[in-house]
Image (cartoon, grey):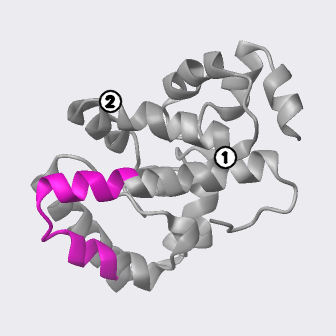
Amino acid sequence: MDISAVNALSYEDFVNLFGNVVEKCPIITAAVWSRRPFVGLKALEAAISEFIDDLPESGKEGILRCHPDLAGRDLQSGTLTRESREEQGRAGMDALNSVEAARMAQLNKEYKERFEFPFVICARMSDKADILRQLSERCSNQRDAERARGIEEVKKICRLRLQSLVLTDASNKL
């Protein structure tokens, strides 16, 4: 799909197509639709990033809270969004052994207790060992730093999801 096709989408079609580029936050794409026409994919991505950056800290935390726990209840029960299911699967979150699963569950719990939002990482750019390592390391960050880091990960996820929707040769480009 080229950018002229993106720009020609009705509001409803735009939100239906791009509504989950930021996990469970279609309000973001609903808001950026009015910034059309976009000169390219980077302009669309920039509009989404600017919208996120302009939010108060509580709004940014809200975006983080829309993300599921990695290898958590939603993965186990099959209630992840299609995008999250594919991303977590690629990273091996659906194939943890019992020791890894227990460690992931404990670290997710500690992280959420500390920060009051779930750990967010661009799973498409990581594997299970890297995710476990970063989750462990990031548990010791300060709240402001971790919120900022989580939002940067959201933007990576968004970029890859946009690329997969618009570019025909996109896999793990950043």
Residue 56 occupies which quadrant of the picture?
Answer: top left
Q: Is residue 17 left or right of residue 139?
A: right
Q: Quadrant of the N terminus?
A: top right
Instruction: Look at label 1 and name its amino acid.
Output: Lys
- Dot 1: what SS? helix
Instruction: Look at label 2 and name its amino acid.
Output: Leu
| Residue position for label 1 | 42
What is the chief secondary structure element of the magenta stretch?
A: helix
Q: Is residue 62 left or right of residue 67?
A: left
Residue 154 location, x and y as percent?
A: 45, 51
Q: Residue at x 37, y 57 (%)?
A: 120
Who is closer to the viewer here, 107 or 173? Answer: 173
Start-end of magenta stretch:
133-151
* Residue 87 appears in view: yes
Query: Which disc, if any, is residue 55?
Result: 2
Residue 115 location, x and y as percent?
A: 15, 52
